[in-house]
Amino acid sequence: MKLQELSAGHGVLTAVQTGQGRDIVLLHSLLADRHAFDAILPALAAKHRVTLINLPGFHGSEPVVTPLLDAYVARIEDGFQEFGIAKDAILIGNGFGGTLALAFALDHPERIAKLVVSDAAAGFPDEGKKAFAVMEQNVAGGGLGTVAEIAARRVYSPAYLAAHPDAIEERKRVLLGIDPRAFAHACKILQEADLVPSLHRLRVPTLVVCGEFDQATPPALNKIVADKISGARYVELRGCGHCPPLEQPEAFITAIKEFVGL
């Protein structure tokens, strides 16, 4: 499959694009990069033009100057503009990318026609905020090596890790390739983000998909998103962790197939 490399804002934001048809835009998790979507990309690109955006700090996308959710949304908007994303696009976000997708949909509902949120929260309880604060402090003080092991383990379900023990090292390599400033900025944003009070005004058709054993954003946080958005539907993938496109790609495609139009 041929991937076209893209850049926006004079290289501030990078992406790759493949396929033809209605636009699908993918936003990856903080605990993974765009390659987490590799297994589902052929199915998506069979009928759609797929753009995989590298979030700030990943694969050449520059970190934001200040750790603000609005700064990330502005970057994504720049990408939509410069990459020529049509206004009937489908936006799919996993993890931190799902939180960004929610924020983008709230600020720019005219830019997308459908939204898929996978294993993402609109806001975290105090316990979750404290975990992000610890990671932010550790990374700021000692780099990503201080959190790579525990963060990598939060990507998968326990059963998957038992069957694929080499997956931890693979995820650690991805995490160690992230710009530490960007990781710390994202942790700060996730501590402060609270989109829950605004979800009731979102009118974009929305599908929420979550892994049963997601340790990073448990099903309860995903159900809040589905409950607060009028008409949203919730699908839970049995036995799956934080990143369904990576751990259970076939089940994820089945979950979104009708909604996305595959």
Image (tube, grey):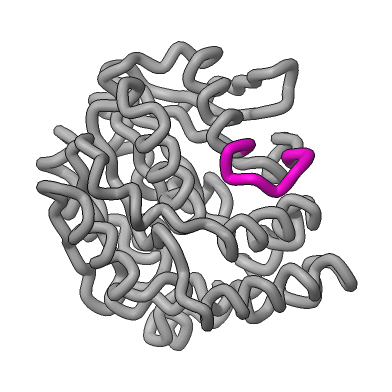
Q: Main secondary structure of the magenta part?
A: loop
Image coords of residue 204 (percent x, y): 22, 35
Residue 62 lies in what quarter of the image?
top right
Q: Is residue 116 magenta?
A: no
> Toward the viewer: 127 or 152?
127
Tell me the quadrant of the picture where the C terminus can be found: top left
Q: Taking the image as drawn, is residue 87 in sight?
A: yes
Q: Residue at x 72, y 45 (%)?
A: 57
Q: Judge left or right: residue 43 versus residue 103.
A: left
Q: Residue at x 31, y 16 (%)?
A: 87
Q: Judge left or right: residue 234 versus residue 221.
A: left
Image coords of residue 111 (percent x, y): 35, 22
Q: Taking the image as drawn, is residue 31 in sight?
A: no
> Toward the viewer: 105 or 42?
105
Q: Which residues are magenta?
A: 64-71
> Toward the viewer: 121 or 239?
121
